[in-house]
Amino acid sequence: MAEKYAEPLAVSFYARDPVSVARDLLGTVLVRRDRVGVRAARIVEVEAYLANNDPASHSHRGLTRRNASMFEQAGLAYVYTIHAKFCLNVVTESQGVGSAVLIRAAQPLEGVARMEMLRNTTHERQLCSGPAKLCGAFELDLAWDGWDLTRGERLWIAAGQSVEAANIVASPRIGIRQNAEAPLRFCVRDSRFLSRRATRRPNG
């Protein structure tokens, strides 16, 4: 099955506004290949972080050492730590802009046994149902910050199953205090792999 996910999404996919990228990432597949084998999971929950008028975004106060990858070219990974846990984002728009999409949750597809070992659980829903859980299942840390996801080497995102607009739910992002009501969290409706239930109507 791994071969069907061999082609990474192109730079042009990411070089758009983060809301569009976030919606279109639903149904795509995060892939990691290493000496042990392949791990893959279908993305079911994301959050968009905007370059302008979004105080919840790490880029809001400008370029820093921590958020430097957000201002690089589209298609790079932006990995940061919070409470000693890691979070994976994909950089959007163009160099110098400072926007990204957080990958919040995914449905495991391949390499599940390795994910279970790394996450120390056999509950499938607990493997990738949150940004820190996902990074644990895929062994992602700060060493992956700035990684080019468009190269198709070691870590990338591939096309998967497109999600119809009627099956996308928009709701407020999770765990933020500023601009907290903006409906910039996007989920696959009724997926049991979400980090938290989506409570708003489809399309917000």
Image (cartoon, helix red, strand yellow):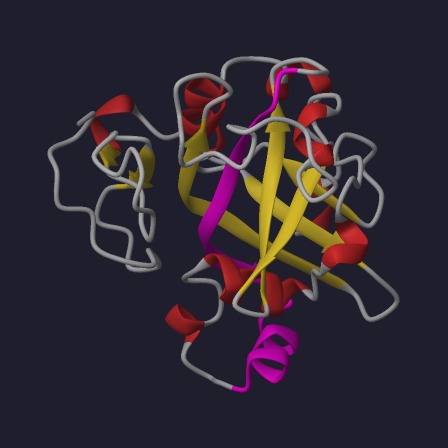
Identify which residue, 88 or 9, lies in the foreground.
Answer: 88
Is residue 154 found left or right of 3 in the rendered image? right
* Residue 122 horizontal/vertical position (percent): 47, 84
Identify which residue, 11 or 167, lies in the foreground.
Answer: 11
* Residue 110 horizontal/vertical position (percent): 61, 62
Is residue 128 found left or right of 81 in the rendered image? left
Residue 108 lies in the magenta-colored region: yes
Residue 175 lies in the magenta-colored region: no
* Residue 104 horizontal/vertical position (percent): 44, 50
Q: At x 55% / y 86%, what residue is drawn?
A: 120
* Residue 179 horizontal/vertical position (percent): 29, 33
Q: Which residues are magenta?
A: 97-120
Q: Quadrant of residue 125?
A: bottom left
Where is 35 relative to 23, above or below?
below
User: Can you name the residue that lies furthest to the front here?
Assistant: 61
Q: Quadrant of residue 73?
A: top right
Q: At x 43% / y 31%, what residue is drawn?
A: 48
Quarter that holds the C terminus: top left
